[in-house]
Image: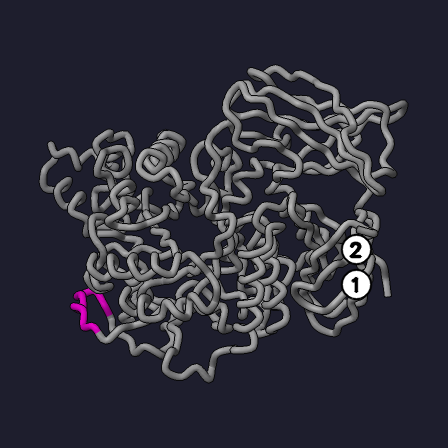
Amino acid sequence: MSYHTQRSKSPHHDGSELYVSNAAPALGEFVTLRVRIPSSYTFAKAFVRIYHDGEPRSFELKRKKKEATESWWEVRVEIYNISTAYRFVFVDEGKYEWLNAAGCFDYDVHSNNDFQIVALPAYPQWIKSSVFYQIFPDRFAKSNDIHPLPDWAKPRQWNELPGARNKQTGTELYGGDLKGVEEHLDHIVELGVNGIYFTPFFPARSNHRYDATSFDHVDPILGGNRAMFSLVTAASKRKIRLLGDLTSNHCGVGHSWLSKAIKEKNSKERGYFYWDKSIKHGYVGWWDLASLPKLNFNSQSLRNAMYAGKNSIVKQWLKPKYGMSGWRIDVGNMTGRLGTDDLHDEVMHGIRKAMDEVKPEAWLVAENADFVASDLNGLGWHGAMNYQGFMRPVWNWINSNSTIGGGFQGLPFTMPKITGQQLVASMSQFNSSIPWRSLVASMLLLDSHDTARMRTVVLGNRQAHLSAMAMLLTYPGTPSIFAGDEIGLEGAWGEDSRRTINWDDQSGWDHEFFAEVKKLVHIRRQRDGLINGGLRWLAIETDYIAYLRESKKESLLIFISRKGVKVKIDVSPYGYECKQSLYGQSAEGETVTIDTKTAVQGVWLLQAKNA
């Protein structure tokens, strides 16, 4: 049996409430910054280096509180700018170490990884205690209502598996609808989630609906606006919020905007698109696809229609009548970008402004906003679908099926198999490039409608899947569970993962797994350490990790392994002992002993030693 590598020897600071007195201050306001320093860490003086109007200034920290194993140091600084970068330095004879969001370094570091404060209203506070449930409308549940079958659709029987990769892939229609969702809200309530993220519900010429023919109403195949209004009412009674999905980058070839633009060259809609005579169809499509015309935001009229106008698409669906609580933006990284045009930031900020005007508490999360750190600087998207800083590293660490993930990760080769040290290094690198507020306002996910399912990634290993699920529900961010994951659905690639749920015969459900996920969802939604806590890594080893989530009200220990391990986790160097087991095996005192032949997970409530 081995002890984990001790990680309690360095100072710690993050953007959570224990360390920053106000993460969303007004300009001119003073903010107190705190650093937690182990007693074994010695220095003569400590300073914060903070940028005021682009110029670095330094202010000395003072010790405010001494505890048995740690002490708290702090400094009060004035916020001059919308974006404020800062880091700490500790000096002594022969000592010179910087602490930034990437860690502690004994050499000069660049401000790219500084901690960041954004002087704007905070992200919607309700997401802190939310867990979302992603629904692909055609595949979740089917009511007995009869809807018109479009000419593009190839009907499928409900419990058939999706077909192979071919031209028919996007045209297979199973008939799921919004009334079907409403009829199965009890399942969602039983799971314990309090949010639903819908992939697009607009009319289109595909089952995925990312090629909208209109943004003004719900697809009649799903039951139309009437079904949506009924669902909004039913969900609201159960305190479940709904998140819509918008393609700001493109529309579908069947959209009236394109039809009018082609027919009337002097129309305002002509300016909504990019035109190129060298292309057979005459306009630029996203990824050269004629089915997805690229939108041109040089057009102010398009901006008004999409987000800026009084009755814009972005605003309309957030109004009480329509009931959305926010937007997930499809390929947000590509919106407004084409060749020499880079209008991305203008459009991103415009969408954020529109949402703030009509519904300031609405959540704005973008796909692929995790590619470029500046997209998550707090001024535009609240957060990203956290593929880069969470899902991909977790897949690389826990997978038993490496051939399944390379393509989705944008790699021309199979995904790697990494250690726990590489997992944490990868996640920490992502986290250090963005403000804390952007991390916790990002959507956490193990998989989605675009990827293989986690159960297939781990080759059916329930315990490994449970470890991944436990990490999803205890790591900073807003978790999202793809419908069917909670009962062990499989899928080897995007369309294959969009399997239907068999409501009539539940013998194929993994009921034992479902029961465990319900416990974890309940913990995620109820425990203050997960709602408001920071993140400190306690143990990082090849096959397991352990971390602390600490808030003003409580401290939690999380343990995740990808396989069987023998280890002792000692929390006494942090001044803690175990008070209560919230999930997993029982533990008392200063040490948690784990001896297992399979992947294992645990959550423990801690208390100050000898409290």
Q: What amino acid type is highlighted by mark number 2?
A: Glu
Residue 150 is covered by the magenta coloring: yes
- With respect to residue 587, does 270 lie above or below? above
| Residue ID at (31%, 62%) | 234
What percent of the width, then of the height, locates residue 240?
Answer: 39, 57
Q: What amino acid type is highlighted by mark number 1?
A: Glu
Indicate left or right for 54 with 158 as reference. Answer: right
Indicate left or right for 583 with 173 as reference. Answer: right
Query: Looking at the image, do the residues carrying marks 1 and 2 touch, with CB atoms under 8 Å apart?
Result: yes
What percent of the width, then of the height, locates residue 438?
Answer: 52, 40
What residue did someone put label 2 on? 577
Res 276 visible: no
| Residue ID at (66%, 38%) | 18
Instruction: Report crowding for label 2: few under 14, some 14 to 19, many 20 or more residues within 10 A (C-alpha).
Output: many
- Of pointers 1 and 2, the one earlier in the residue sequence: 2
Q: Main secondary structure of the magenta part?
A: loop
What residue did someone put label 1 on? 588
